[in-house]
Amino acid sequence: MSDEAQTIPGLGAPADTEWETVVGLEVHAELATATKLFSASPNRFGGEPNTHIDPVSLGLPGSLPVLNEKAVELAIRVGLALNCRIQPSVFARKNYFYPDMPKDFQISQYDQPINVDGWLELPSGKRVGIERAHLEEDTGKTVHIGGGGRIHEAGYSLVDYNRAGVPLIEIVGHPELRSAEEARQYVSELRSILVAVGASDGKMEEGSLRVDCNVSVRPVGSDRLGTRCEIKNVNSLRSLGRAIEYEARRQIDQLTSGQAIEQQTRHWNEDDGRTHALRSKEEDYDYRYFPEPDLLPLNPSTEWVEQIRHALPALPRDRRMNLAEAAPSVDIDNIALAVERSMDELALAAISGGGAAERVMTHIVQNLADGSGQLTPEALAELVGMEEAGELTATQAKKVLAVLVEGGGSPQDAAQTLGFEAMDTDELESLVDSLIAEHADEWSRFCDGDAKLTGFFVGQVMKATQGRADGKAVTQLLNSRRG
Amino acid sequence: MTAVEIAAAVRSGQRSARSVVDEHLDVIAGGDADIHAFNLVAADQARARADEIDGAVAAGSDPGPLAGVPVALKDNLCTRGLATTCSSRILEDWAPPYDASVVEQLHNAGAVVVGKTNMDEFAMGSSTENSAFGPTCNPCDTSRVPGGSSGGSAAAVAAGFAPVALGSDTGGSIRQPAALCGVVGVKPTYGLVSRYGLVAFASSLDQIGPFTTTVADAAAVLDVISGPDARDSTSISEPQPPVSHTLADGIDGLRVGVLTELSGNGIAPDVAAQLQAAVRALESAGASVAEASAPAAVYGLSAYYLIAPAEASSNLARYDGVRYGLRVDGPSTPDMNTATRSAGFGDEVKRRIMIGTYALSAGYYDAYYGKAQKVRTLIINDFASVWERFDLLVSPTSPTTAFPLGERTADPMAMYMSDVCTVPVNLTGQAAMSVPYGVGDDGLPVGVQIMAPALGEPVMFRAAAVLEASL
């Protein structure tokens, strides 16, 4: 629980000591295929309404689905990356009426999904179980015109079927997450995996990654799951965290005031920061699943699955482990950040090229947040070497780095162009001596033990040299002059 | 003239396709008011197409094996720009933007579409009385039903409106009307003919096939419309040998079984007598005949009336007033859906949607749909053991000859019973056809059903040719 949540009025004891939040996530990701799951229409975000359509994606009478092999391959990649078992699967029809669903049923996988029984490891090392990751088709989009976009007050509605039939993978995790922050880490890690294996672009803001959260609470120490509510319409990592915190708080308030939790589907409202009841369990659809007779059972050969396994790129978890091994003194958050920014290859190459790991990682984390541009691993290693040798100060190194990112080249040349030549000892000594003479008062206070004045003298040196001097060398010199 | 004769004459330049088409359009104009085989006669389009074919012949190219042959299409086969109604109010004005695969294949073979034929709404029925546009009459006796659901197609061929028609067969909808109208009707092996563009009734059972006056014509049409189609995932991916090449090979030495479950109880004596005559004809052509048994086949009708409605309840969900077809407005989208479907569907369609929805519902799935699928597996297994001992099976196609219009409309169970002989083969996916074989006591046609294992069409057609020749 965050501090924020604890400030909600009407509350007794602090939440985090008595209640535990339990979260299970269902993540839908659009697969990055060229065409739709069952037809040749383009799978592309946006476009004029109803231009990426054909008889199949419109569900016209007489049309039939034909499975897109690329979508199956991407689903298998996801399954392998999530340590799932890849099994023979069957498509099923999920029947319910909705205008943006052209056939009034969705082709999905039900009791025999393609991927089952996997796990995902969070950067913290915690493993979260994956129940299944199955293939299904997306729906179109309904736009309500008039009445401020609300369905009940709308004058009329328009449907855009461009998205109808876009391939989705639905990844169902076990309810093993214990906080909003863990849920955020899970989605963030899952997104990195989907992007790494080329299965999805993972853009939550464009809706290519969508998250439904099942939230329940229980007394700390209990091993029974509480009644859950499913939250829909969570469109960013930030709202994911907010929605879970709000919902857990709501349920705790309800339980502590003696009311039971009703199993519901709830809608997250970004504007008021609350979840609102959509429908109760009793009002839930009976989807009348049955095997899709227009498609054959899907039975990927072992050879194909192995071929896909061998072609898988390194996954974020492995990349973190590699980097952590190369930079053992760097903390895991910074390792994770480097991997998340896809800077781990650069870091590893610079380290194996002789760059000191800690300094390399400092640049990666602090100074390369906007990308590495033209910077080569060799140049980064060399730059770090120059810092280590005292040829560049930290401030100078940062400026040199900016030049290398912008235009490439070697750090020697860049330092020269910037006029960052290391000061020789004689030059520095005479400068320090003249400053001591110039600031006799400050010098005597420094000699009396006023440590604050170290900063004053270093500052004066930096000013006089326009940052060329090495702060550590100046401090050493001051101490030796004091005797 | 048969289709084979027409095509030969047109290809050789002896006759123009235009004269063939004009002649048939004249017969339709003169006769269809009494029969109502057609929902739509595409006269202008047919004449234009005939002229194209004549142009091709004049230019020295071959328009194909069905050059100039008039074809009537059941109104559940999609035709680009031409209304495809399924004889339902809900699709009354719907013209598809695409052609069914079989329509493309016929076109590429030089055939000329002359119109769309009447049917039981969404192919649900056995008499063509469930059409929203009124029943079709049997050309042999206009007080009788033509059978169904492809009654319009059967009647069109029987009345001479077209030498060829296509229908669809989900539980007997080609074979039963073929028998009642005295023409040849074929239900090919599931997957032999692409279903792309056939408006679905029950996807795991539906199959398109021809109606013709002769076995050779049926073979010629089947050879045109069969074959792999990438647009239908259930289409058989390997090309099959043509059936027309082996038509005259005879049946000497073939083992023919008379399927007792479909040939005893409930079969009218005059129909049974014709089956016996057919069996004698097969024997004298050199086949050995014995009784055969597939015990689970008696449960075929029960399983069928759960599986087919279950699939139909899902297939017909899309007629919701949102995208095409009828829309009856309402205060909300669900109200509009309900009003549209209430006004747009006839009683039999509603009955089956309700049965199917119930059979798939939570808590009932295992008892109904699940159990029906198990029965289907039993029937498949029973037939598999029969095929170890027999090359072909025979039975009546329909328990009776054509019944009077109106006789069974108030009694759905009596109507469903007319499919008792044809349904098992849809559940197994095997091939079957109906060949006219004499008449009953009322002078109306009787059909004999020949059944073959999956992809057994070549042998099945050889037996059909033998029966035809023995008359």
Image (cartoon, rainbow, N blue to C red):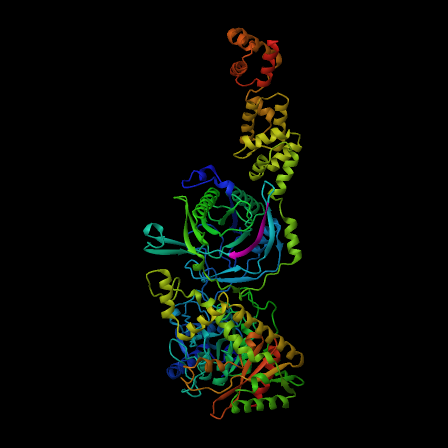
Percent coordinates x, y for residue B387 in the rendering: 64, 78
Quarter of the rendering containing residue B230: bottom right
Quarter of the rendering containing residue B30: bottom left
Percent coordinates x, y for residue B376 in the rendering: 57, 73
For residue B344, say whether it is visible: yes
The quarter of the image holding the C terminus of chain B is bottom right
Quarter of the rendering containing residue A365: top right
Q: Residue at x 57, y 91 (%)?
A: B277
Q: Nearer the viewer, residue A446 or B67?
A: A446
Q: Main secondary structure of the magenta part?
A: strand
Percent coordinates x, y for residue A308 in the rendering: 63, 52
Percent coordinates x, y for residue B436 in the rendering: 52, 86
Vertical position of residue A184 compared to residue A471: above or below: below
Q: Residue at x 57, y 56 (%)?
A: A72
Q: Nearer the viewer, residue A18 or A178?
A: A18
* A105 displayed left or right of B279: left
Q: How many marks?
A: 0
* Residue that sits furthest to the bottom in the current view: B441
For residue B312, say whether it is visible: no
Vertical position of residue B133 compared to residue A165: above or below: below
Point out the stretch of residues depicted in magenta.
A127-136
Magenta span contains residue B76:
no
* B82 displayed left or right of A337: left
Q: Residue at x 51, y 87 (%)?
A: B446
Vertical position of residue A472 compared to residue A122: above or below: above
Q: Nearer the viewer, residue A419 or B66?
A: A419
